[in-house]
């Protein structure tokens, strides 16, 4: 079978990880190549453009996995990248998916999940590379644009939306708080469309993606000759939003050096371009959003306290999906199943009982965005009109199994003996150490050198593995 020849690349600073994944996949006909750092792996893909599954650890020495991810996809668009981490965070999952990863696995890995990931993504369509270098996004103004649909199914969210509509009638700055994936940009767009500015520009700026050295010129524009290469004048994001709304996403990432200029604008609504001597008045409504604790950052000095109080007078807080009631999750699931089925022109599939249980128990660290993407994948892979657990991304399955949640989709603890990579690692390590002792006729020093293990550490492990059970 052609998929058996699919190469598997492992990038992990623990040499044992590649050895163990090799052991898991060898019996199924896969070849595995390992690298201990991103730099060597990137060099490999400068010449190798073949289709492959790449297991990429997030925490690596030198260049970390997150910063290397878009570079891998640029070098080889045929890669299916599965991120690995023992330290899962909401941001890491969301950012990895945005940058082009097809899935994520939580360490210690379950061997079945490793094999399923390779089999699942062997023939998966290529992930289109997201333009990660774009510093900002602009929503073109349209007099005919409709109010964005902000899904509300519970009294709590209906109350929040009611408050948002009241805020929309004001020109005061609104601060939206919430984890990644909760819908902060959608809510900002909703406020804009409910305001008198609805037919004017709605400009979206991802503050986290703009390098500090470019922040002033991108946001406030520049005059001709302001710096080398500035052959013409250019309007910044503030000017583009004139008359409408400027949405500053992840405002906590605004460089401290630029926060004073932002504070000044909130006070007098005047800006000056980089290299310019004149100031210009602008009519802009600011909406800011963050998943950070700005009050904490203000106290630590990484965010101006006066700016925080200036932008936080009107605040909306979007709760994470895990804290929302069951009926809201049910409603969201039904909505996304119907929406994706409609796009694919197929009947709306049903959830199997294990799949439903998985959805209800999973913590959804990526929130609504993660749920929507997972259900899109599940609808695509469903057969016979039923969505099974196997239709969901491997990362969700491994997360549930790893946390041993009480679902029929997750293996019981009693069934997971010797199934984690840690168990397999010990078994392989013992075999390698005892084999080295045999090959060196009992010479412990040579055996340690053969395995490239510190001698004292080798003696400790040898004692551990030769003790009677």
Image (cartoon, helix red, strand yellow):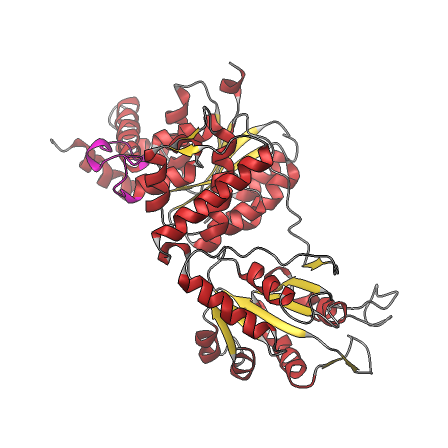
Q: Which residues are magenta?
A: 403-421
Q: Residue 13's quadrant in the figure?
A: top left
In the image, taking residue 273 as reference, residue 246 lies left or right, namely: left
Residue 17 position, x and y percent, is 39, 36
Magenta: main secondary structure: loop
Question: Number of marks in the image?
Answer: 0
Above or below: residue 271 compared with residue 218: below
Asked if the stretch drawn in magenta spans residue 151, the answer is no
In the image, taking residue 24 as reference, residue 193 lies left or right, namely: right
Which residue is at a point 32% across and 46% down the rendered structure image? Answer: 361
Q: Residue 22's quadrant in the figure?
A: top left
In the image, taking residue 146 as reference, residue 227 lies left or right, namely: right
Residue 3 position, x and y percent, is 52, 20
Asked if the stretch drawn in magenta spans residue 404, the answer is yes
Which residue is at a point 49% across and 29% down the rendered structure image? Answer: 381
Residue 436 position, x and y percent, is 30, 27
Q: Looking at this view, is 427 or 52 the one in front?
A: 52
Quarter of the rendering occupied by the C terminus:
top left
């Amino acid at each position: 079978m052609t998929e058996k020849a699919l190469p598997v690349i492992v990038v992990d600073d623990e040499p044992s990880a590649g050895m163990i994944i090799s052991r898991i996949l060898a019996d199924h006909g896969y070849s595995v190549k390992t690298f201990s750092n991103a730099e060597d792996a990137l060099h490999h893909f400068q010449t190798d453009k073949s289709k492959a599954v790449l297991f990429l650890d997030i925490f690596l020495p030198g260049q970390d996995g997150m910063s290397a991810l878009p570079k891998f996809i640029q070098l080889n668009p045929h890669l299916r990248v599965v991120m690995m981490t023992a330290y899962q965070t909401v941001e890491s999952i969301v950012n990895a998916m945005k940058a082009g990863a097809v899935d994520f696995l939580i360490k210690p890995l379950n061997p079945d999940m490793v094999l399923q990931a390779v089999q699942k993504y062997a023939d998966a369509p290529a992930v289109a590379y997201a333009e990660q270098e774009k510093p900002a996004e602009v929503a073109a103004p349209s007099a005919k644009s409709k109010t964005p649909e902000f899904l509300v199914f519970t009294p709590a969210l209906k109350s929040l939306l009611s408050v948002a509509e009241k805020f929309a009638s004001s020109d005061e700055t609104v601060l939206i708080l919430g984890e990644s994936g909760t819908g902060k940009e959608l809510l900002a767009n909703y406020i804009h469309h409910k305001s008198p500015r609805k037919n004017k520009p709605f400009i979206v700026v991802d503050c986290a993606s703009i390098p500090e050295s470019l922040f002033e010129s991108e946001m406030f524009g520049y005059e001709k000759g302001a710096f080398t290469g500035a052959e013409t004048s250019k309007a910044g994001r503030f000017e583009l939003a004139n008359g409408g709304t400027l949405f500053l996403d992840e405002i906590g990432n605004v460089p401290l050096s630029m926060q004073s200029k932002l504070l000044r604008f909130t006070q007098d609504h005047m800006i000056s371009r980089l290299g310019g001597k004149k100031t210009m008045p602008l009519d802009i409504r600011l909406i800011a959003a963050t998943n950070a604790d700005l009050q904490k950052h203000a106290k630590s000095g990484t965010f101006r306290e006066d700016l925080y109080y200036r932008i936080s007078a009107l605040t909306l807080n979007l709760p994470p999906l895990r804290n929302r009631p069951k009926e809201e999750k049910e409603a969201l699931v039904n909505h996304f199943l119907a929406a994706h089925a409609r796009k694919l022109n197929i009947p709306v599939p049903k959830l199997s009982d294990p799949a439903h249980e998985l959805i209800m128990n999973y913590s959804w660290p990526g929130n609504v965005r993660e749920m929507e993407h997972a259900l899109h994948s599940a609808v695509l892979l469903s057969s016979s009109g039923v969505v099974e657990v196997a239709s969901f991304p491997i990362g969700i399955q491994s997360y549930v199994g790893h946390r041993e949640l009480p679902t029929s989709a997750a293996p019981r603890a009693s069934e997971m003996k010797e199934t984690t990579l840690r168990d397999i690692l010990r078994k392989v390590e013992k075999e390698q150490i005892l084999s080295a002792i045999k090959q060196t006729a009992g010479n412990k020093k040579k055996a340690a050198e053969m395995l490239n293990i510190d001698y004292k550490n080798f003696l400790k492990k040898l004692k551990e593995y030769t003790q009677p059970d």
